[in-house]
């Protein structure tokens, strides 16, 4: 599966999002690029939050892909997607009740959970108070071990947030999360307790939080810290084999949406943030002017399909 880098004709804009986060629509997945800071940054419990003065330089990529893109897919029959990053493959499911973890494959650890761990329920907002836990087994450096996992997620607030690249998003939902993993006993009778403490910012329609400020503790000692901030100039996954140049403008849209695409008899589908089809329209080769004046304000996903049912592009657009 190849990536299509979509050209968005927009200079300095703001997104206006809903304060309730629903399950995202991810039929072909999403590749998210982040500005990485190898440290943690302070996050207050009240907004607005402005990170535009942060100096970044490292880019970190996470790919949330359909399950069948993993060679380990058969070991995770209840997952719908796989998150691929430099740290390994993490098997997830997205459905209207929540985002769930089904296990992982890394350089040292393999796990597959019979009972998934709900990382966050859908829908949620800043009043969230969520706890879930499970017990299973894993293989660590070829040795079997028992493992328990617990996740705690608490809503903090919602408000405007400005990224290091200067883009401002409105009504992000901020959560404080703790994920605790206890592995053992080892052959020597010892246990390993890893706690991941995060503050995360969610926006509608995205596969993952758009900001994560993370501290990791191992048996009580701080061993890792990092902050990630979404880069809006990113690539998105499509189902075709070759890239097709599609230009959609402006973003955000108000009354008219312009689609320039190179194929005859293509089709536009527009979905709400909950996955409801709200617009279904044929396209001609070249420029197409689409009237969206009657649509409510919010985040939408557009899907452009060729005459042979190939998906040319799937992306997000804001209606203001």
Image: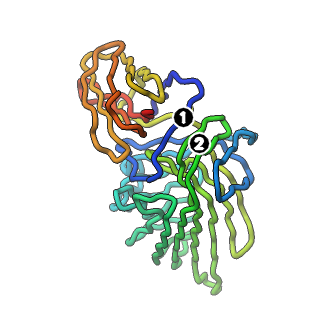
- Judge whether 297 appears above or below 198 on screen: above
User: Can you give x and y, in whole percent of width and height, for residue 142 in the image?
Assistant: 54, 70
Return the residue found at the far top. 286
Residue sitting nearer the eye, 280 or 183: 280
- Judge whether 109 appears above or below 18 on screen: below
Horizontal arrangement in the rendering, residue 127 relative to residue 59 (left or right): left
- Judge whether 159 appears above or below 221 on screen: above
What numbered label is drawn on residue 230? 2
Q: Describe the element under mark 2 as helix, strand or loop.
A: strand
Horizontal arrangement in the rendering, residue 55 relative to residue 88 (left or right): right
User: Can you give x and y, in whole percent of width and height, for residue 109 in the image?
Assistant: 55, 65
- The image quadrant that residue 182 belongs to is bottom right
The quadrant of the image that shows the C terminus is top left
Q: Describe the element under mark 1 as helix, strand or loop.
A: loop
How much space separates mark 2 and mark 1, taking CA atoms?
9 Å
Q: Nearer the viewer, mark 2 or mark 1?
A: 2
- Judge whether 147 appears above or below 311 on screen: below
The quadrant of the image that shows the N terminus is top left
């Amino acid at each position: 599966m190849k990536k299509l880098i979509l050209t968005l004709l927009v200079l300095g804009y703001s997104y206006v999002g809903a304060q309730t986060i629903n399950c995202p629509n991810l039929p072909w997945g999403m590749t998210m690029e982040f500005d990485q800071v190898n440290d943690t940054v302070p996050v207050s419990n009240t907004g607005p939050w402005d990170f535009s003065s942060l100096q970044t330089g490292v880019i970190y990529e996470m790919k949330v892909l359909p399950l069948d893109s993993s060679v380990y897919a058969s070991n995770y029959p209840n997952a719908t997607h796989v998150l691929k990053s430099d740290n390994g493959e993490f098997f997830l499911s997205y459905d209207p009740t929540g985002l769930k973890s089904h296990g992982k494959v890394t350089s040292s650890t393999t796990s597959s959970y019979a009972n998934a761990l709900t990382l966050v329920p859908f829908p949620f907002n800043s009043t969230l108070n969520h706890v879930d836990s499970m017990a299973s087994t894993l293989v660590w450096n070829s040795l079997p071990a028992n493992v328990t996992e617990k996740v705690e997620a608490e809503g903090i607030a919602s408000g405007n947030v400005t990224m290091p690249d200067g883009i401002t998003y409105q009504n992000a939902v901020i959560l404080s999360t703790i994920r605790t993993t206890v592995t053992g006993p080892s052959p020597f009778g010892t246990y390993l307790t890893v706690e991941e403490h995060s503050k995360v910012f969610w926006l509608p329609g995205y596969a993952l939080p758009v900001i994560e400020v993370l501290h990791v503790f191992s048996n009580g000692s701080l061993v890792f810290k990092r902050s990630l901030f979404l880069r809006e100039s990113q690539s998105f996954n499509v189902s075709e084999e070759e890239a097709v140049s599609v230009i959609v403008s402006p973003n955000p849209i108000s009354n008219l949406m312009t689609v320039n695409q190179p194929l005859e008899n293509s089709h536009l589908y527009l979905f709400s943030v909950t996955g409801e089809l709200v617009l279904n329209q044929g396209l001609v080769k070249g420029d197409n002017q689409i009237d969206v004046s009657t649509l409510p304000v919010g985040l939408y996903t557009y899907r452009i399909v060729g005459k042979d049912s190939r998906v040319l592009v799937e992306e997000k657009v804001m209606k203001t």
